Image (tube, rainbow, N blue to C red):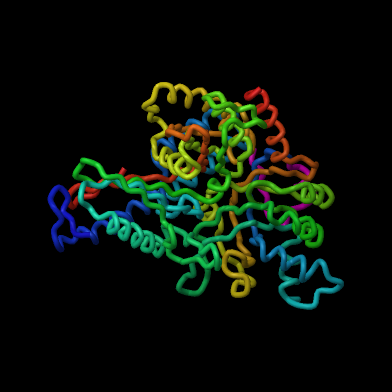
Amino acid sequence: MNVKLGEKMQEGDGTVDNLTEHFVELIRRAATDLPADVEAALVAARKNEEPGSAAEGALETILQNVALAREQSTPVCQDTGTPIFEVYHPVGLSTREIAQCAQSACAVATERSYLRPNAVDSLTGKNSGNNTGIGFPTLHFNEWDEETIKVQLLLKGGGSENVGAQYKLPDGRLKAGRDLDGVRSVVLDATYQAQGKGCAPGILGVTIGGDRGSGYVRAKQVLLRRLDEPNPDPTLDSFERQLLSDLNRLQIGPMGFGGRTTVLGIKVAVQHRLPACFFVSVAYMCWACRRAMLIVRGNKASFE
Amino acid sequence: MIHELTFPISDDEITALHVGDQVSLSGVMTTARDTAHKFLVETYIRTDEPKQDLELYEELKEILAGGGIYHCGPVVAQKEDGSWRFVAAGPTTSIREEVYEPEVIRHFDVKAVIGKGGMGPNTLRANQEQKAVYLSAIGGAASLIADAVKEVVAVYKKDEFGVPEAFWVIRVESFPAVVTMDAHGRSIHDDVEEKSKKQLIGLIG
């Protein structure tokens, strides 16, 4: 991609090669380490569990694994998941070219064993071998007024993806109506249904509203928020805090062994909906919440 | 307290274990997942007399008597001298083997089945009858578990089944796991589900 940020596009300044390489480094960082806030939440959870319990032991093993993965630069989990890129770009940049950089980077990262080959043809069962394919990886583009490119990446594994759930309110079985109390009931039910199978303690991304497609998309986007970041909406912020405490009363515990930590955090977003529809979409992220951020300013890249 | 267990494991060591106990495994065991389980049952168990792969049968009988089966499709790397190294080796979901596992446990006298997510009532019954346990490894702890694999002793059926599905015979040291189904008829998976259901009903009224 021929662009010098902060100026109009120019030919041949080499930024395209750099951007692909920056994406590879973004993937490496996401796959082989956990964000500081997630690791801190796991440390706090371990302290909170009964000494000598299976729950405490599971968290201890998890924390040792994270430290080792970071030290060796090997994947935290062998299921490196779907790479989900959330891209913020200046006016006038070609999103097609950014997408090509992301795809090339996925292939390079697979070659370097940061990613497991994870893209399977749904008709033939054949693995593409390089983490690219139809609709793979996932990319979303947002134009903004800044002169920088910001890319957030989430690696979301299959075990946790399998336990995500979508509800349509009102829900007769759960006596859940079209209000926050109803939302609370279905999120509790989704977490109960998941048990330890999504590799608990998980992080929940929840969308209230939207349609069946947009609800799930947004539920995954909010997983990019830091655990210690309050919800900008005060009503949702207090809802998140109360619900987190209720979710942990389910006592499913790490890996479903029982215990005090079932969920590390919950992030809630709202979207407008059709009068006839009231969806609640729950995206379950495993404890290995692998996200990382890249900021490109001029020719310089920084990572968080 | 962590129970240190070395393969082959005795009946007494198994009966001393209860759900919730943490264990640390050492010695030689084998991986086996979907294709391998189907093969074991069809080739050696549901037949009057095994007729093919007889050498492998003898090898497996020796490894599995008092031994362990790990539900895992590893990421492996081949070294320059041709030997293998485990790179990432977290557990895979175990319940898919529920249709085979009880027969495998009884036929080969397996003492420990290791995986993720728990198994069903038939495996629980086989555990009781045969004195065996189901151990949960920690999902996602792929680097740590690969580090506990000190040596790939042998690999069988790699070309036929593919890398994830092959029998990888490995020597492990201090492989961490938790007893979630014991030989006394208890399953954490059942207990936690029941308890969390009560909590759920209390919370949503």
Seen in the picture, residue B91 relative to B199 is either above or below; the reply is: below
Q: Nearer the viewer, residue A219 or A199?
A: A219
In the rendered view of the protein, which quadrant contains the C terminus of chain A?
A: top left
Seen in the picture, residue B40 relative to A95 is either above or below; the reply is: below
Q: Is A213 situated left or right of B159 in this image?
A: left
Residue B204 can be seen, yes or no: yes
Q: Nearer the viewer, residue B66 or B43?
A: B43
- B5 within the magenta span: yes
Q: Nearer the viewer, residue A261 or A137?
A: A137
Residue B12 can be seen, yes or no: no
Seen in the picture, residue A168 relative to A302 is either above or below; the reply is: above
Residue B131 at what x, y percent from top left?
A: 80, 50
Seen in the picture, residue A177 relative to B123 is either above or below; the reply is: above
Q: Is A120 situated left or right of A88 in this image?
A: right
- B82 within the magenta span: no
> Residue at the spot x=36%, y=63% of the render?
A108
Q: Is A136 situated left or right of B177 in this image?
A: left
Residue A234 at what x, y percent from top left?
A: 40, 22
What span is in magenta?
B1-17
In the orientation shown, which residue stands out farthest toward the right? B48
> Residue at the spot x=57%, y=67% of the render?
B163
Residue A264 at what x, y percent from top left?
A: 50, 33
Q: How many marks?
A: 0
> Residue at the spot x=75%, y=59% of the render?
B100
Q: Nearer the viewer, residue B121 or A242?
A: A242
